[in-house]
Amino acid sequence: MAGTAAAGAKGGAPGTRRVLAPLALAQFICSFAGSNMNVMINDISEDLDTTVQGVQVAITIFLLVMAALMIPGGKLTDKWGRKRCLLAGLVVYGVGAVLSAAAPGLGVLILGNSILEGVGTALLIPPVYILTTLLFTDTASRARAFGAIMAMGGIGAAAGPLIGGLITSAISWRAAFVFQALVIVVIVVLSRGITDPLPPDPARPFDTVGAVLSAAGLVLLVTGILAVDNNGWLALGLLLAGALVLAGFFAWVRGRERAGREVLLSTDLFRNRTSNLGLVTQNTQWLMLMGVSFTVAAYLQVVRGYDAIETGVIFTAATLGILASSLAAEWLARRRAQRTLIMTGFVVTIAGVAVLLPLVAWQPGAWAFAPGLLLIGLGLGVMLTPSVNVVQSCFPETRQGEISGLSRSISNLGSSLGTAVAGTILVSGLSKGAYAVAMAALAVAGLGGLTAAALLPRAGRPPVREPGGRHRHGRRSSDHAPHASTAHRWFMRSAGPAVGAVELLVQGEGRVDEGRVGERLREVPELLARGAARGRGQGQSSEYSMCRSRSAGSQYRLRQ
């Protein structure tokens, strides 16, 4: 089955599409759970006799639990297996959804929605990204697969208000959790066709102390952000405590690494510059997505007085934008460098915020939100897929468990921070002024993400082949001069095992170091052997090679 799936990844076989369906649905339902409650704030607070701030705390705890436990969840995939973790997460999530539907008060809702659904998500999301990376091995198929998954995730986050609003208005907010439970059942049935491409390692140790320290540090950090509105000194204390706990976590990890013991998260993951920048862009993207969703939904309901359906309909513009640009991920990946796509996404998203603010201020109608939300959706959809691909492709399959957990934790921490920061500003004074400040804060965060994207290494645009073996500019691929920079970059994407040797022979963007040609050529046999060892491995893509070579500096070089 794994072999079939892998083959289908290249050819787009129906079997592979059936494997992709449950993975994409899993991302959809987790993103949906993080956003649909935004339009049910008034209904839940009235039914459970609580406050808007209480519901906001429940939403943020859900996102926080995901961020805190995603790293341990990713590590457990190596021990338990990817499919087993996926199914376990689905079961825990389903139980939480049922419990939330029957919640008599805020406490039970937090237990079911925030805790159990959060834990379930932390178990099931890392396998989604690991399996996608392992089963879809070439650049185009992986971009298509991640595009579908990120499209469903973006739709879940953006359409969550609409779907949740329709269900809440037609039936009850409790029915929205029943809907989640039913979708979980469908995913479990569809997941029967998935076969884990790698065997689990039950004997592999698990760093329990590291898991507790990392989770505690993240909890303290986000709790400190939430406390800013109530008590500044308490917030400062929590933030400092979180920083100290995380510092202790990394000291613990380094100690175990020096002793040669298994760690929860290897510090080597943070030595890759390209991956680090990609993680920053992921964090910022989800911060903006969830922050905008919470801010706009709260403003529409509390300030404008719109009901759940009206609020959800307004979000359709963002949903359509995310869907259109995410589904074009493969087409875009073939024509533009990933750095270019990520930067473009941030520019368009920030422009959307800039358009949204004056239109809403000048026009009292609901449709004043549409242009800005459409641009925000388009921008987010353009950059979600390449950001994930940049990070995942920086590491071989043996590190996918760790990097997937870290990547999803960083993204969900961004979701938590987006909701916490925007929510804190809004709860401090639900007015037009507070709304504008919250959106401006999200735009400033977007500028930080744009800066990180600009620092990503440059890469040549992939060649677009036309019938007859010709490229778009009319020459056959064999006609290109071997020293051309674009030809070198194309070669870097396809050279495979010899890429490590080529990186040492070639400097910068394709210029040969003429002063050392003779010396370098005498090293070719050894370099080819080392380059073959570097480039070998299933699922190792061209982006992995480029990422590894760029992470140590501005020039291509092989790590000894």
Image (cartoon, rainbow, N blue to C red):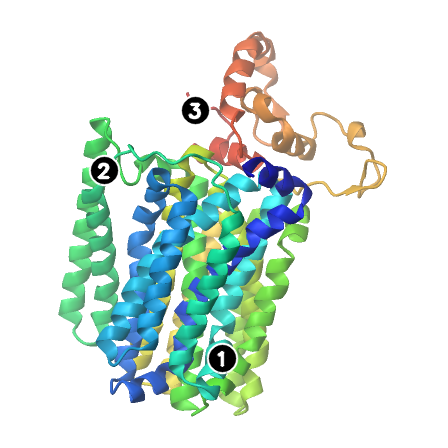
Give the camera-side residue of 394 and 15.
Answer: 15
Q: Quadrant of the C terminus?
A: top left
Give the camera-side residue of 4 and 148.
Answer: 4
- Mark with earlier residue (3, 1): 1
Badge 2 vs badge 1, beta-carbon distance below 8 Å = no
Q: Is residue 153 left or right of residue 287?
A: right
Measured in 3D between alpha carbons, the distance from the residue under mark 3 to the one under mark 1, in whole angstroms, is 48 Å
The three-letter code of the residue at mark 1 reads Leu
Q: Nearer the viewer, mark 3 or mark 1?
A: 3
Q: Which mark is residue 367?
A: none
Can see residue 420? no
Residue at 35% in and 76% down: 101
Q: Classify residue 253 by image quadrant.
A: top left
Q: How far from the left and from the top, in percent, is residue 294?
A: 40, 75
The three-letter code of the residue at mark 3 reads Arg
Q: Is residue 447 left or right of residue 9?
A: left
Q: Nearer the viewer, mark 2 or mark 1?
A: 2
Residue at 50% in and 83% down: 166
Measured in 3D between alpha carbons, the distance from the residue under mark 2 to the one under mark 3, in whole angstroms, is 23 Å
Dot 3 crowding, Cα within 10 Å, few <14, some 14–19, many 20+: few
The three-letter code of the residue at mark 2 reads Val
Q: How far from the left and from the top, in percent, is residue 58?
A: 29, 72
Can see residue 302? yes
* Residue occupied by mark 1: 357
Measured in 3D between alpha carbons, the distance from the residue under mark 2 to the one under mark 1, in whole angstroms, is 45 Å
Q: Is residue 234 left or right of residue 377?
A: left
As helix, strand or loop, the secondary structure at mark 1 comes to helix
Q: Which mark is residue 559?
A: 3
As helix, strand or loop, the secondary structure at mark 2 comes to helix
Q: Quadrant of the N terminus?
A: top right
* Residue occupied by mark 2: 253
Q: How far from the left and from the top, in percent, is residue 385?
A: 54, 53
